[in-house]
Amino acid sequence: MLKNRVTYGLVLLGLFLFYIFCNAYVPLVVIVLLLVLTAVSGVLALISSRKVKVTLEKDRCSSDLKERTVSFCTLIKNTSRLPAPVVCFEMALGDVSENADSLRRVRASAGAGEKKYVWISLNAPYAAYVQAKIRRVKVCDSFGIFSFRVKCDCSAQVLITPSSKGSEHDYFLKTRTASDSDVYSDTQKGDDRSQVFEVREYRDGDDMRRVHWRLSSKLDTLMVKEYSRPLEERCIVLLESPVKAEPEQIKKSADRILAELVALSARLIEREQLFSVYVYSTQSTGFVPVDVRDYADISAALKAYLSEPAANEPMCALRTFTEKMAEAAALYYIYDSRMIGDQKLPEGREAFLPIDVSEYTASEV
């Protein structure tokens, strides 16, 4: 844009000097013609800019596991009867857990009443939760002299699954069933009909089989029973946070940990084992629990893990979780020994299974 303006100014200056010193009227006509054409082009660009929208098509954004790429689809829509000669915008791409973004600059044209799709792709060799934001949208005239801002505030996120391959062998910690348990959680609801967690008023969508009819008749309003969750059923998968290091090393470690999470979760789901994934939050120094009941819940666990930045010290997740370890009937601890240094794991715990992913490699897709 600046280059076009400088060039345009130099051309006008040269023609004006030629007119003064050579006393020729041809340059004057050319100067007037250039000024009129530039003004008309600017006015047309201003009018069309009011009807131009740039949005991210979230349904069309996707990742290609075979090629290890992720693509973001941008829609440029011009509802004006005038063409938009040049539509310029920037797309900021980066991991949700990182502050640094890479910028992609796009220039395109949109005819009158035209819809145009623009795909922007980037390589995704490791697991990541990538976010794209569109900013600095403007419509320029044909000469590149005038530009007019277009309001735009849209973003989209795409989850990239791990490229590494989890372990193939089966390992399971023994957990007792609800029928074997007489200790229940006082903080979490469950599905054990033998124990009532609380009774509350009916809400749309509640199962009518859970209605407490006797109490409902007394209070003259529908009351619903929430059942308890046996503590012995509680199986936890604890993910260790990567430590601050080189970006490539952090991404590789996270990719291996999440690959094992996917493999382990699939086997636990097949066994109909109820479990939760605990992700350490470096900002709140607490945990983000994700209950996994089916394959769709695994994506939520991946997103939670990839949204957190790297920790300042090794084994933050395990050290923080030690106080709650007694609550878990079975604890799977997934970690990368390359990232914990000389730290030692706790010993003598029957329901504790550490899983080291330091030797995992990228899978063949």
Image (spheres, rainbow, N blue to C red):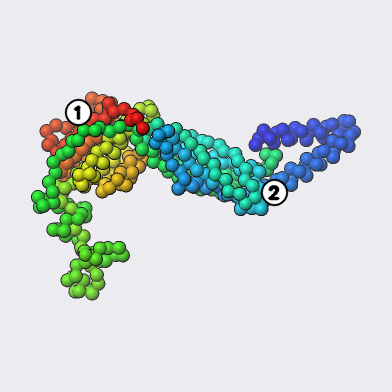
Residue 179, above or below 212: above
Quarter of the image holding residue 271?
Answer: top left
Separation (CA) of disc 2 from disc 1: 69 Å
Q: How many neighbours does mark 1 have within 10 angstroms: few (below 14), some (14-19), or many (20 or more)? A: few
Q: Which residue bears the numbered disc 1?
A: 344
Q: Is residue 213 left or right of residue 108?
A: left
Q: How many neighbours does mark 2 have within 10 angstroms: few (below 14), some (14-19), or many (20 or more)? A: some
Q: Are marks 2 and 1 in contact (CB under 8 Å)?
A: no
Determine the residue positioned at 17% across, 71% down: 214
Residue 44 is labelled as 2
Q: Position of residue 159 (x, y in %)?
A: 39, 41
Determine the residue positioned at 20% across, 54% down: 190
Determine the residue positioned at 66% across, 43% down: 85
Q: Position of residue 254 (x, y in %)?
A: 33, 33
Q: Of the residues shown, which amino acid type is indicated by label 2? A: Leu
Q: Is residue 122 left or right of residue 19?
A: left
Q: Position of residue 226 (x, y in %)?
A: 21, 60
Q: Position of residue 52 (x, y in %)?
A: 60, 50
Q: Of the residues shown, which amino acid type is indicated by label 1? A: Lys
